[in-house]
């Protein structure tokens, strides 16, 4: 186990600190775009995780804080909380995980405004760090976390927008003061913002049949670079995502949703060795549209969700990344159960690939617990809006 922990530690140090942000061009065929704090792009939602990470335009829940904050005012309930636990590298080590907590509250005369917040915590367990020669350089408990808060509102019956602000802290080499080849080490801090829009229009066919088309777009993690030493600064995973979804309500008992997301990192492909400190954030975003093969830098997520009586859900999905951009391709599946104000979602990523193309979530179950309700619970009353009111006194 110690050997495995040392390997993980060395990988983190060399991949995120010493190497920093460089595009790798292997034999002219690979264009890996790496960033610092990649945990910001780990899906923290079991529902989306079962749908190939397609969730930008699907119906909102508390995890919309991550996918597209503009969806929150379209929620059916006034309040919502979600908690997710995601094991990481389960096949290698047992104590690496991502924990996510998100919540929202709607307000306004028509409930067309919302405030929301979330916290993400990524623990890398106990690590024995080594240098490139295998010599010990320290031990520690590396960890990363972020906290964000946002505001969103409807602009019309069908259109909404939202903005969230985020603080990011990354201590990936906790317990180490000096990294060979990387100079003095210090934890990194950064600030970023998400800006999203969401459009959803429902077409009623009969009382029990309807069709809903929705569209979402979000620019996420747009913000400052992060620094782990005094000599360089690295990009965080700024991203542009666009999604569409189509929901068909067949009757009072059955509905199905199809979703498609496309994501592109707003980080330039830098085909040179050296520091990228001179590349500003704005220039980096603009350059990301002019370097490399644009179409091959887009990741695609395709997902489907079937509900029976709005009580049990079956989900499946597929994620595709081009071979020259990382070659991650995998199938996902999962279940959801909803009762009253509670919902439990589970997802599973089917093991595929090997080496660098094997997803760290392969052969992993992750779970999300969601609470959504219309009224804050008080003494003598229920949080569920379906509870009948008492009969008036005679």
Image: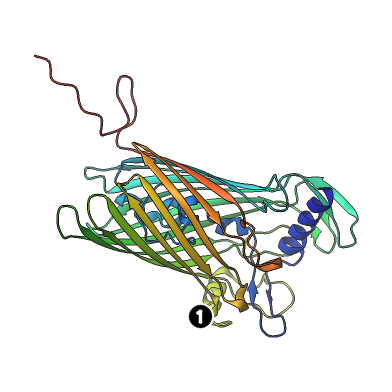
Judged left or right of residue 99, residue 335 is left
Scheme of image coloration: rainbow
Q: Is residue 323 above or below residue 80?
A: below
Q: Quadrant of the C terminus?
A: top left
Residue found at x 67% / y 64%: 233
Residue 110 percent coordinates (x, y): 22, 45
Q: Which residue is mark 1?
A: 295
Question: Is residue 122 visible to the viewer in this orientation of the structure?
Answer: no
Judged left or right of residue 391, residue 112 is right
Residue 260 percent coordinates (x, y): 41, 67
Q: Residue furthest bottom?
A: 28
Asked which secondary structure carries label 1, the reply is helix
The answer to which image quadrant residue 357 occupies is bottom right
Residue found at x 24% / y 59%: 158
Q: Nearer the viewer, residue 338 or 291?
A: 338
Count of numbered circles in the view: 1
Residue found at x 32% / y 43%: 106
The answer to which image quadrant residue 141 occupies is top right
């Amino acid at each position: 186990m110690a050997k495995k922990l040392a390997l993980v530690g060395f990988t983190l140090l060399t991949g995120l600190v010493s190497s920093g942000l460089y595009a790798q061009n292997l034999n002219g065929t690979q264009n890996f775009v790496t960033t610092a704090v990649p945990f910001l792009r780990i899906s923290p939602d079991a529902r989306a995780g079962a749908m190939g990470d397609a969730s930008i335009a699907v119906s909102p829940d508390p995890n919309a804080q991550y996918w597209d904050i503009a969806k929150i005012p379209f929620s059916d309930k006034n309040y919502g909380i979600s908690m997710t636990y995601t094991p990481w590298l389960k096949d290698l080590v047992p104590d690496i995980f991502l924990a996510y907590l998100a919540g929202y509250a709607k307000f306004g005369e028509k409930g067309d405004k919302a405030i929301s917040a979330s916290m993400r915590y990524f623990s890398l367990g106990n690590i024995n760090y080594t240098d490139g020669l295998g010599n010990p350089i320290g031990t520690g408990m590396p960890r990363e976390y972020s906290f964000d808060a946002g505001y969103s509102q409807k602009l019309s019956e069908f259109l909404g927008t939202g903005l969230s602000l985020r603080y990011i802290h990354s201590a990936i080499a906790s317990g180490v003061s000096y990294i060979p080849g990387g100079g003095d080490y210090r934890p990194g801090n950064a600030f970023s913002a998400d800006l999203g829009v969401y459009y959803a229009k429902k077409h009623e066919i009969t009382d029990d049949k309807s069709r809903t088309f929705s569209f979402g777009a979000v620019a996420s993690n747009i913000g400052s670079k992060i620094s782990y030493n005094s000599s360089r600064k690295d990009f965080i995973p700024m991203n542009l995502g666009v999604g569409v979804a189509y929901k068909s309500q067949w009757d009072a008992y059955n509905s199905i949703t199809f979703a498609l997301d496309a994501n592109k990192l707003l980080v330039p492909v830098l085909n040179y060795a050296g520091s990228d400190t001179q590349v500003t954030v704005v220039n980096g975003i603009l350059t990301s549209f002019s370097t490399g093969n644009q179409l091959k830098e887009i990741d695609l997520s395709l997902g489907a969700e079937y509900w029976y009586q709005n009580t049990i859900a079956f989900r499946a999905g597929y994620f595709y990344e081009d071979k020259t951009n990382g070659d991650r391709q995998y199938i996902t599946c999962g279940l959801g159960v909803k009762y009253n104000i509670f919902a439990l979602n589970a997802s599973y990523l089917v093991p595929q690939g090997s080496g660098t193309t094997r997803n760290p979530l392969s052969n992993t179950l992750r779970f999300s617990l969601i609470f959504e309700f219309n009224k804050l619970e008080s003494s003598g009353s229920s949080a569920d809006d379906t509870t009948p009111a008492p009969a008036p006194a005679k």
